[in-house]
Image (cartoon, rainbow, N blue to C red):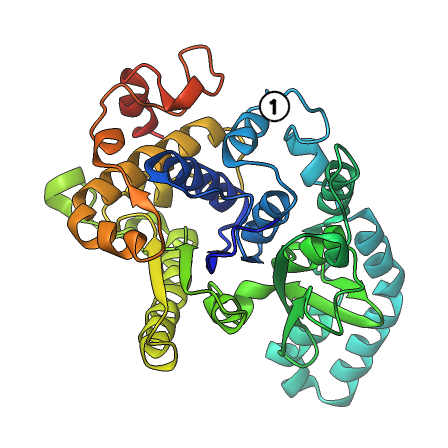
Amino acid sequence: MTSGNGVGLALAGGVVEGGFYEVGVLCALAEAVDGLDLTRLDVYVGVSAGALVASMLANGVDARTLAAAIVGRSGDPTLDVHPDAFLTPAWGELADRLLRLPGIAARAARRVLAAPRDALGWGLVAELGTAVPTALFDGRGIERFVAAALAHDGRTNRFGDLRTRLRIAAVRLDTAELATFGAPGLDHVPISRAVQASTALPGLFCPVEIDGEHYIDGVARRTLNASLGLEEGATLLLCVNPIVPVRLTSSRDGRRSLADYGLPLVMSQTFRTVIHSRMDTAFRGYARSHPDADLVLIEPEMEENALFFSNIFSFANRRGVCELAYASTRRHLLREFDRLAPVFARHDLTLRRDVLEDPRRALFSAEGTVAPLGLGPSGLLGSAAAV
């Protein structure tokens, strides 16, 4: 059963690390807001990594269990995260491209012979580019992981069997249209398959074919897809977005410029800036289109550059990223307490200052397990910030 108070949750992407960040944020929220049960919300919206997290919450797996699963200590083997289960090489895609190679080479040769001056430029590069695999991994490991987790302990892999509404966003590759799995018309697709489609980040995971159409990561179209939650009637929508650009200041960290780090970080900053700007524009629109709804957005501070400089595809930092998100969310809620407490109160929820001011609280214990009731050694907060 849902809470029935109109509270919803929208989770953005952020690849592997983004999902870890979201779990840390959710642990902090669940602990600090009395009356908030993140497994009994009225609507869940997930895109990319957020789709996986949302699918678990909608099935009754709470945030603290997810945090324990991230470090492999949930006590449920179907939930525990293992990197090799997610990163399955796209051998089939590679084999398919190799089989196409002779035909591609023949077409390229004919092009060179027909128009040598034109073909020996970008035209030839484009022709040969069709031999390049679409991604490094096939995403089937993600689908298998989610399917196995949802087949256990009373959970379900069917949208129609949920006691709440779950919406998973992806993009139709060939038309660039938004697809909402779980909504009428796409509610027959298994949740695990929808998650695979929503996490199919181009270049990393192969496009996913469902009913003859190919789908890619939903972030390609929208960042948070908060509108899906508002359209489902959410009057309080909790939004978590891990994707923010960095604000680098030489006086603070001694780094001169992102340009010194080469193309990958320049592209990362560009991508994050576009994504974040798009989300800001959408949020201004929500204030006009849904004036009676409250949106609470939680995301990293732009100055928190530890997240920016870490590897978003890495599983090695999972505990540190969770703890960092947990600690930074607590600081944010405390800093914005006077603004946010009345927002939560309008929905019969209580933001607790005493919990936020308790210095003993940490997500993980010294042994690496999830600390009971969030109580743990405060020294872990410092170590997490160095991730």
**Along the viewing direction, whichever of 23 and 130 lies nearer the viewer:** 23
Residue 267 in the image: above or below residue 281: above
Residue identified by numbered label 1: 74
The percent coordinates of residue 370 (x first, y second) are 47, 21
Determine the residue located farthest toward the bottom in the rendered image: 115
The residue at the point 79 percent across, 39 percent down is 151
Of the residues shown, which amino acid type is indicated by label 1? Ser
Q: Is residue 41 left or right of residue 343?
A: right
In the visual, does 53 lie left or right of 355?
Answer: right
User: Foreground residue, 332 or 117?
Assistant: 332
Q: Is residue 95 above or below residue 83?
A: below
Q: Measured along the vertical axis of the image, is residue 293 above or below residue 239?
A: below
Residue lying furthest top in this view?
Answer: 367
Residue 193: x %, y % from top left: 76, 55
In the rendering, at what x and y percent does residue 110 appear? 82, 82
- SS at mark 1 in the image: loop
